[in-house]
Amino acid sequence: MSHSAASPSFKGWTKPGPVPPGAVSGLPAIGPGETLDAISGYFRLFQLAQGHRFSTDDVLTAWYGTSWCPRADRVLDLGSGIGTVGMMAAWRLPGARFITVEAQSESVRLARKSAQWNGLTDRYEIREGDFRDASVLCADERFDLVLGSPPYFAQGSGVESEHPQRQACRFELRGTVADYCTEAASHLAPGGMFAFVFPISPDEQEQRVHIGAKASGLVIVRRRPVVLREGERPLLGLFAAMRATDLPETMRSQTWDEPPLIIRAHDGSVHPEYSAVKLSFGFPP
């Protein structure tokens, strides 16, 4: 993902989408300890070379949400980190307005640089704070699509990185998947959708998703397991949830289980379907 942002093609593949101002001017510039990496078409993302880096989880969250809610006008990204999920979604939803919420100042700083580079500042508001704080989002703010990539593990349940940015992305320093469900449910517009990623192995992890969703009045209407390598057990799950009150009674206890999405084939090559997912985001296949 380090090919030139100014190059129209990559190994015979033509890069789609608008050319943002940063690709022309080179501003804002890359700072010490930072990298600038392609995320969608000509869009790029500022990251710390030794900090949290965007991953497949982020790509999948943005893809799943924008695939099943393609007409969103207002989008909220909870715990938005350096902005990967929100900016990928903004590339796919050029008419939508975004609000993102992130508690770490360093991540917010990087996200604001990326928003400027990608020409998103007129429709992409980045708020600094803990989304559980009632002062961060107004009670009457509503969104057609809410996106989230909650931290996966409880504090003390594994080896935690010494880098605070990495630590907060994996361990529940500021909220659990249940907190994400609660906040999403309280800010969904009528008929809105909450799309997120979370581990489904071991089974106890997925149980946390269902418990959190039900307690928040959400129904998981779609679920898709993610297999990192063909033949292995799914480790992650993609979920699309809606408020029970927005659904007919016959759908309030139903979840459509989709076939697993495989990231890499047996031989380590990118699986054809994941190549198609990448293409839908302006990535080289």
Image (cartoon, rainbow, N blue to C red):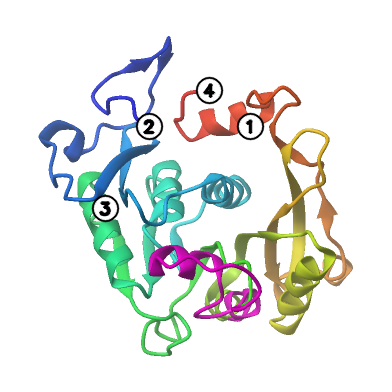
Magenta stretch: give its range: 155-182
Which of labels 1 and 2 is toward the front? 1
Q: Are marks 2 and 4 in contact (CB under 8 Å)?
A: no
Secondary structure at numbered mark 1: helix
Identified at 46% across, 30% down, the residue is 283
Assess whether mark 3 and mark 4 are in contact (beta carbons under 8 angstroms): no
Q: Quadrant of residue 265?
A: top right
Q: Earlier in the sequence, mark 3 or mark 2?
A: 2
Please name whichever residue, 184 or 129, is drawn nearer the observer in this view of the structure: 129
The residue under label 4 is: 285
On screen, residue 34 versus residue 272, left or right, reads left
User: Helix or strand or loop: what does disc 2 sit on?
Assistant: loop
Disc on the earlier residue, 4 or 3: 3
Which numbered dot is residue 115? 3
In space, the residues marked 4 and 3 are separated at their CA atoms by 25 Å
The amino acid pointed to by label 1 is Tyr
Q: What residue sits right under mark 2 in the picture? A: 41
Pick whichever of labels 3 and 1 is earlier in the sequence: 3
Residue under numbered circle 1:
274
- The answer for how far apart the CA atoms under marks 3 and 1 are is 26 Å
**Measured from the top left, where is residue 276 in percent x and y?**
60, 27
Mark earlier in primary sequence (1, 4): 1
- Could you give the CA–CA distance between mark 3 and mark 2, rounded to whole angstroms? 14 Å
